[in-house]
Amino acid sequence: MESSSNHGGIKLLLAAEHEAQQIVNAARTAKMARLKQAKEEAETEVAEHKASTEHGFQRKLEETSGDSGANVTRLEQETDAKIEQLKNEASRISRDVVDMLLKHVTTVKN
């Protein structure tokens, strides 16, 4: 009789081992599915962020490119104003510079 109870105990242990293996396999499958889902979600987020960043870049590019005519006009005005300022400054001090040069050229040192 002991033999049949040992045999029954072995069957019980094998069944428990089989059940445990199924639980482990199910957990492994669930883990792999979750990892795959997480990877897909991350790829989606990265794609959305990339698209958003690209959209912002394109918008900035359009804003600056669209104003290139205005920028050229502004720069021309600033350049003209600076040239006029330099001409005024040169005409203001040109007589002093000529006098200083004549003084140094005509002065003889022994």
Image: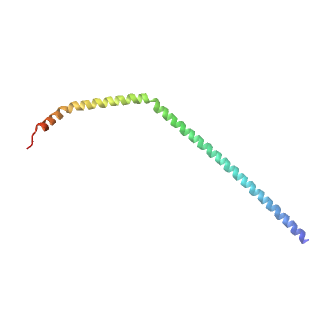
Residue 34, given in percent of the width and then of the height, sits at 68, 50
Q: Is residue 106 toward the left or the right of residue 14 in the image?
A: left
Residue 76 sits above or below residue 31 on the image: above
Q: Is residue 63 toward the left or the right of residue 94 in the image?
A: right
Residue at the image position 14 percent from the left and 35 percent from the top: 102
Picture colour scheme: rainbow
Q: Is residue 94 toward the left or the right of residue 106 in the image?
A: right
Residue at the image position 65 percent from the left and 45 percent from the top: 40
Q: From this viewpoint, which residue is outermost toward the right?
A: 1
Residue 47 sits above or below residue 94 on the image: below
**Quadrant of res 52:** top right
**Quadrant of res 16:** bottom right
Q: Is residue 103 toward the left or the right of residue 57 in the image?
A: left
Residue at the image position 85 percent from the left and 64 percent from the top: 11
Rendered-image quadrant of the C terminus? top left
Residue at the image position 89 percent from the left and 70 percent from the top: 3
- Count how many numbered circles sit on residues in the image: 0
Residue 78, given in percent of the width and then of the height, sits at 34, 31
Residue 13, given in percent of the width and then of the height, sits at 82, 64
Rendered-image quadrant of the N terminus? bottom right
Residue 109, given in percent of the width and then of the height, sits at 9, 42
Q: From this viewpoint, which residue is outermost toward the bottom?
A: 2
